[in-house]
Image (spheres, rainbow, N blue to C red):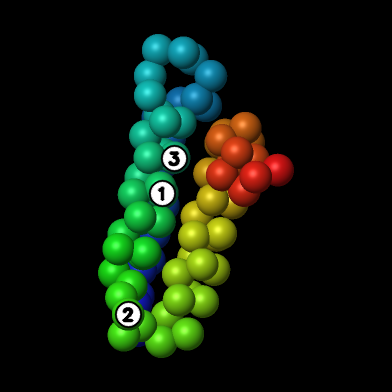
Amino acid sequence: MITLIAKPVELKCDGLCGQCRCVKDYADKRLLLCAALFANLGTDSTEEEVAFAYAEEKRLILEIANVDQDLSDRLLNK
C-alpha cells in the first residue's frame, strides 16, 4: 500500500506581494507529490492503491485551490 502524507507548507506571505514565489512553490510541492503517487504505481498495483492515488491527487489539487484557484481549475478541467 502506498502511504503519502503531505506536510503542511506555510506561506511566507499571502502570495499577493508579487516579489516572492510562495504560491508557486506551494503548488509545485503538491504537484510533485502527485507525480510521485503515480510514479510509484505499477502493473502489480492493486485497485485500492490506484484508487488511493487518484483520491490523494484530488485532495492535493484541492489544497492548491486554497492559494491558486485558477491553477486548480485548470488541473481539474473546470
Per the model, the C-alpha gap separating discs 2 and 3 is: 29 Å
The numbered mark at residue 27 is: 3
Between the C-alphas of marks 3 and 1, the distance is: 5 Å
Which is more toward the observer, 15 or 42?
Answer: 42
Q: CA distance from mark 2 to mark 1?
A: 24 Å
Answer whether labels 2 and 1 touch (C-beta < 8 Å): no
50 relative to 77, above or below = below
Is residue 65 visible to the viewer in this orientation of the structure?
no
User: In this rendering, is residue 1 above or below 77?
Assistant: below
Identify which amino acid the numbered label 2 is placed on: Thr
Could you tell me if the residues under marks 3 and 1 are in contact, i.e. CB atoms within 8 Å? yes
N-terminal label among 2 and 1? 1
Amino acid type, mark 1:
Arg
Q: Position of residue 61 (x, y in %)?
A: 54, 51
Disc 2: which residue: 43
Give the mark nearest the N terminus, 2 or 3.
3
What residue is rendered at 64% in x and 40% in y?
73
